[in-house]
Amino acid sequence: MRKPFVVANWKMHKSVDEALDFIRSLQGRLPDADLVECGVAANFLALYPMLQEVKGQPLEIISQNAYAEYEGAYTGEVSPKALADAGINYALLGHIERRKLFNETDDLVNRKVIATLQAGMTPIICTDETMIQKEFSGSVHYVFEQLINVLRGVSFDQVKNIIISYEPSWAVGVGQHANPNLAEEGCRLIRQTIADSYSYEVADKIRILYGGSVNPENIKQIMNKPDIDGVLIGRASLDTDNFLSMINTVV
Ligand code: PEP
């Protein structure tokens, strides 16, 4: 059984104080960690104080990024080593905003995946709209390229420990209705790609999340899909009650 995973992606929202208030307001209200895994991806500045505040609560504090080298002379970057040493278990990598606004390529994301694994963390690898491209004929053509590129050099043993998120550009941050059937189609395709590149056993174990306009109204329909093991939530995760209500839907 793949445990559901509900991840809030706060992007560049919330100051350190606001992040700590959010954690305090969750105190004693999160479901048992055996039922669902929950996490919040916050900005770098807030991560360490959040880790101190969260102690004992079933909530993962997640990095929104990590640099592509284990450590070294890379002014202004944050190393996977420093994140892992601080107690961070997960890093989001290759989010569509990083690709679009900061020109992150498959190659860079691949190096980040390798460095993050080297530090003993679990990458949550974001894949986006290049998974689905409409051909001029109008039929849907699936492209596996991005996933294959970012997994280059990831071994059989390592791939079991990664998480993949499918975030089509038509649904991320735009307030569009998230279409559960298309979401399932993308996630199913990712699982098939893992099965073809590694094995069916690994593909069956790996957790695949969907991200894009998930909210308290549509989360149930999305999570009912067989290949969707969790969600990555942007805007709707900024409010504690919304976040809790979405988590409780999944349990
Ligand atoms: C995201 O940015 O990862 C995301 C899923 O955003 P939203 O839920 O706001 O579409």
Image (cartoon, rainbow, N blue to C red):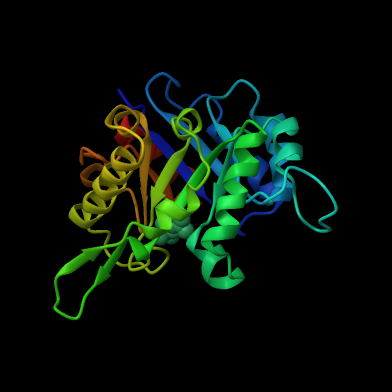
Q: Residue at x 33, y 27 (%)?
A: 2
The quarter in which the N terminus is drawn is: top left
Displayed quadrant of residue 109: bottom right
Determine whether 167 is above or below 216 in the image.
below
- x%, y% of residue 204? 29, 30
Q: Toward the viewer: 176 or 77?
A: 77
Q: Residue at x 84, y 58 (%)?
A: 75
Quarter of the image where ligand 1 sits: bottom left
The quarter in which the C terminus is drawn is: top left
Q: Is residue 184 left or right of residue 6?
A: left
Q: Does residue 110 appear in this view?
A: yes
Q: Residue at x 39, y 27 (%)?
A: 36
- x%, y% of residue 147? 41, 52
- x%, y% of residue 165? 41, 48
Determine whether 2 is above or below 83 in the image.
above
Q: Is residue 104 left or right of residue 75?
A: left
- x%, y% of residue 15? 69, 53
